[in-house]
Image (cartoon, coloured by chain):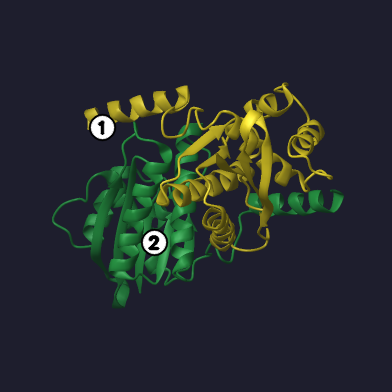
Chain colours: A yellow, B green
Amino acid sequence: MRVLGVDPGLTRCGLGVVDALAARRIALVDVSVARSHPDDAVPRRLHQIAEAVETMLETHRPEAVALERVFAQHNVSTVMGVAQVSGVVMVAAERRGIPVALYTPSEVKAAVTGDGRAGKQQVGTMVTRLLGLDEMPRPADAADALAIAIAHAWRGGSAPTASKATTDAQRRWAEAERAARRRG
Amino acid sequence: MRVLGVDPGLTRCGLGVVDALAARRIALVDVSVARSHPDDAVPRRLHQIAEAVETMLETHRPEAVALERVFAQHNVSTVMGVAQVSGVVMVAAERRGIPVALYTPSEVKAAVTGDGRAGKQQVGTMVTRLLGLDEMPRPADAADALAIAIAHAWRGGSAPTASKATTDAQRRWAEAERAARRRG
């Protein structure tokens, strides 16, 4: 199974493609970091990231996209950019009929290190080891994207995907929306 | 000048196209509300909204897109959906070389009613009057999208666009990012 992992971001967006082999072995296919300049207009920046994501999808034809789930843990500007990039990545995948799976950072850390609270260095070290690389992928966004891809590849695409599961918050919101529609 | 106004949302996304005529008169070109179902997967929902936005762009060839600026004033789930839709709209416009302008809700209210704290009903009434319609566009998302388009059409595309201006928050973030890059 081939997976594109995405660590979404507007300034740096990590993109890592891996193949799941037999016996839980994982092979690196490609890794890169799409960048855009903070001084540029947001539409232009998003477009640059979109083009890089689409090039990855066209070049490597992954069977799944695994994406870090957006939380409001950072400052508002950062979250907005991450959410915007996530939306763009989801549409790019959906257009090609590729399912999208969402993972929290702690799910990814737990998958690759066994510890949901592992640090960046530990995640990077395990990614390097699991892929049999000589050096740790840099910057951290590249290693993070590969970690997300590995987490999903190991689950064989059986993870709760964006297509199947909604968070509790999303479910409550959906119910509120429906109630609002009924009220008119 | 022809403007597509977008009131971004995942469940309902208002889309309104207007033409600015002489003497501050405004004509309605088209209005609709793109919808997606809260039970569907987010990638599918975003894709549906993207298709509706792209159909509007292809059909009416606006010279500008005006979009409501995302704030974290609602609950996190709503903001995420709005940000994701905004990102998708920005990329659709950028792909076609169409500039994107961002407006806060109070800027839009001030533009069409003279009062930045006007209520939905007042905005709807003014949109109906300004466009010479017999009935208020419904749902409110449709009227809001038209209000955003009118606000931008009246500024003749001279508004601070996403291409030129950044908010203070974005600027501070950009500076922080650059500082982080220098450190890292």
**Same chain, marks 2 and 1?**
no
Other-residue count near label 2 (Cα within 10 Å), few / some / many at <14 / 14–19 / ≥20: many
Vertical side of A78 occupied by A51: above or below: below
Local secondary structure at mark 2: helix
Give me the chain letter of mark 2. Answer: B
Other-residue count near label 1 (Cα within 10 Å), few / some / many at <14 / 14–19 / ≥20: few
Which label lies toward us, 2 or 1?
Answer: 1
Image location (x, y in percent) of residue B140: 28, 45
Residue corresponding to mark 1: A181
Instruction: Say which mark, if any, is on residue A29.
Output: none
Calculate the distance from the C-alpha at mark 2 to the C-alpha at mark 1.
28 Å
Image point (49%, 28%), residue name: A158
Residue A61 appears anywhere in the view: yes
Picture quarter containing residue B57?
Answer: bottom left
Q: Which of B156 and B98 lies nearest the eye of the viewer?
A: B98
Picture quarter containing residue A143?
Answer: top right
Image point (68%, 24%), residue name: A110
Image location (x, y in percent) of residue B61: 33, 71
Q: Residue furthest right?
A: B183
Residue corresponding to mark 2: B151
Q: Residue furthest front?
A: A22
Q: Amino acid at mark 1?
A: Arg
Q: Amino acid at mark 2?
A: Ala
Q: Which of A180 and A93 lies nearest the eye of the viewer?
A: A93
Image point (59%, 34%), residue name: A153
Image location (x, y in percent) of residue B2: 34, 71
Local secondary structure at mark 1: helix
Picture quarter containing residue B150?
Answer: bottom left
Give me the chain letter of mark 1. Answer: A
Image location (x, y in percent) of residue B70: 50, 46
Q: Which of A167 and B152 lies nearest the eye of the viewer?
A: A167
